Amino acid sequence: MAGLQLNTSQQEAVDHGPGPCLVIAGAGSGKTRVLTERIQRLVKSGVPPWSILGFTFTNKAAGEMRKRLEENLGPVASRLWLGTFHSIGVRILRREWQALGIPQDFTIYDADDQLSLLKRIIKGLALPEGSLTPQGARSLVEKYKSALVDPVKAGEHAEGFREAQAARIYKEYQRGLSQAQALDFTDLIALPVRLFDSNKHVRKSWAKRFEYVLVDEFQDTNPLQMRFIQHLSSATGNLFVVGDDDQSIYGWRGADIRHILDFETHFPGTVLIRLEQNYRSTKPILAVANAVISNNTHRKGKELWTDREEGQKVRVVSVLDEEEEAEVIARRIKSQAAMGSKLRDFAVLYRTHAQSRAVEASLGRYRLPYQIIGGTRFYDRKEVRDLLAYLKVIANPSDTVSLQRILNVPTRGIGKTSEARLIDLAERRRLAPGVVLTAYAEILDEDLPASAARKMREFGRLLLDISAAPATDPAPQVLEKLLDKVPYVDYLQGSDPVQAQVRRENVEELLSAAQSFYEARLSETAKGGNGSNGDMDRLGQPGSLLDFLTDVALVADIDKMEARADTITLMTLHNAKGLEYETVFLCGVEEQLLPHAMSCDDEGEIEEERRLFYVGVTRAESRLWILHAMNRRRFGDTLSCAPSRFLEELPEEWIEREGQEVLATATLGTYGGWGARSTYADKSRGYGKTSNRNGVSSYSPSSDSAPTQPRSPIANRAPRINKAVQVLKPKSNEFSQVSGFDDDVSQEDGGFRVGMRVRHASLGDGVIHKLEGGGDKLRVIVMFDGVGARKLLARVAGLQPI
DNA sequence: ATCGCGAGTATTTTT
DNA sequence: TACTCGCGAT
């Protein structure tokens, strides 16, 4: 990234002495480097690593920073306190549990667990119709908790029906958590803060422990985190924060941009340092970034500059719809890859996860490997959650949410009635249901029919049998035993064969995740004495089930991102923060999407959306593509989309527009509703002629000297557009072209029959198991030899009968 | 107790 | 469009 030598401002930041310091670090200005060098310098000057506390936004960032520091400082680097707010919170709670009256081996509930608990509560309370939904309740409960308002206070101050209900739910929710010996995400920070608030002694001892506190991505801290920081830095006042007000994009989750804007007021004597030299991007990209962000009013104000020579202009591309958008991207990547670019140099960024679909399909068609960050995360998959629920119950039988998830999965004859009776019985005995099963199985007979009681006893014994020592048993071993004792994989088999295959793979992946976690922990322990866990605050043996569960609870998807893998990366703009790529495609830059329709209420929200756009722009090193589509499918029907207002803020001299014809034509016309298929051929011929070379449908930019891709049939696919924008497209024709096969494949619902043998370019040969849908939506389920079942879209898969 | 189907809803962003 | 949930039938 940056050169070998630090620039003056960077050096100043690294050398900053005692007292508060605010570093306004523009995108690509080398802030990570400043942080690591500063920590290095502190350690070298004699500050013990364990008295340095560094907050990062993701675990990944913490890991990378630690790795770099280890290279320069050796194993002592593992004694640094480096992590996200949540993981640092956990570390503190694992030690201060007594003071807070919580169990030391508490379970961590994520959003999904919260929701399950809330659902149960709402049902149990039998609230009147039209009351809070679980989601609604959760957001209110979260609000209370982040403001450190307890249920009693919430009840007292409740205004109106809704809030009164929320307070009631909140109270039950807290009860449920504590009964399950669980903490939710907010607790991980709120509890330490509450402890520090109320207990001067504890606060002092923690604050004294940390001589230096550093915070990365400071612009995205919420008030609770801010208090956490303040407490922990209160002894010395050596608070060093790094951030960029222009990249504050988490306002919706409570981040308060004023923390950075007003930092100097809150911390008198603050030294302010600005890093404005950008080492990442070319001039055109920076010019675009600067121009866009200057439209925001709530900012400190800064201008990024670079001494990098001029580069390629930023390309703004208008396309007809999301498919064409995806097509442009895939085609572009393919051709650049053919010229020697690595796939890992490309990122496709979008506002919402839903946008990934079209891009995925396109990349798949071009056989370009990609990885998606976010979306349904690995740890959110049903099968993964099921297995984790088992593990959680084994580790903590009080965890009722998890117990309910698996009580009858796979089915073991414990139905709703039995479940209700169990819960009822447990309630009366003031025990958690899981505890009844595992420790007091004998009382089951009193209230349950003999057969039900027997099944439950068996289940309880099963759980104990899998692991009775979660603090010491290695996580992978427990998981293996679980898979051995519980016919879970067979149970997966029972469902749709296609899904089953994918799910089995996910089970495998979980197992290997547990294995590599275990190994990593072992080598960590061997190497660093205590590993990254210098102060024995980790629960149980390294690599044990308990250790694993804590880790899993705190992982975000981005943390798992494979940096080594040579694939294209797809993710939301939020996930892209802090990353950089040689070429970036910013797609869906349209009104309603960016800015998003849900974030247009006031200028503040628009500004945050603009920052999001800015974040996207500044990820790019040398090539930036900004795309917007004229039409986009949403909820099944097609909407026409206006280009984003942000596109009007781009400086013309630094950009190059493509697809103008479409833009011009489309904006002039009136929206014509359903495009008539009969006119398709005519219009496309007339139109395609002009557009093929310079227009939309020829995606090779004029300045591109490289040989263009061998033209795939779609290149000749004319835009289906004329004065009146056609909202619906004639699909079936088009796709027989796309797949590049003759009509016999995709027409008349197939040419496919169940039982037929077919060949797929990458999956090999197989037998058609089932057909679904029809026309261009025809899906073929194929059992591939040695690969297993796959569901494929016939129009895309290019299957050949053999 | 389990399965299947139909209806209704969802898409903003996440540690 | 696609997925989840709930209800009703077996």
Image (spheres, coloured by chain):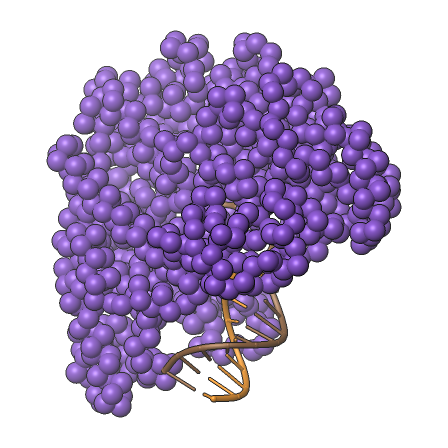
Chain colours: A purple, B brown, C orange
Q: Is residue A659 above or below residue A494?
A: above
**In this image, A136 relative to A511: left or right?**
right
Q: Residue at x 60, y 63 (%)?
A: A773
Residue A209 lies, in percent from the top left, at: 24, 34
Q: Is residue A691 left or right of residue A324?
A: right
Question: Is residue A20 or residue A340 the one in the foreground?
Answer: A340
Q: Position of residue A101 (x, y in %)?
A: 25, 59
Quarter of the rendering containing residue A522: top left
Where's residue A457, x and y in %? 20, 79
Query: Of residues A476 and A4, which is closer to you in this image?
Result: A476
Say whether residue A458 is visible.
yes
Residue at image position (54%, 37%) is A366
| Quarter-of-image position of residue A427 | bottom left
Where is residue A791 shown, x and y percent of the image? 49, 56
Residue at 66% x, 38% y: name it: A714
| Above or below A337: residue A782 | below
All told, the count of numbered labels is: 0
Q: Quadrant of the N terminus of chain A?
A: top left
Residue A210 in sight here: no
Q: Residue at x 33, y 20 (%)?
A: A38
Taking the view exactly as shown, the residue that stands out farthest to the front is A802
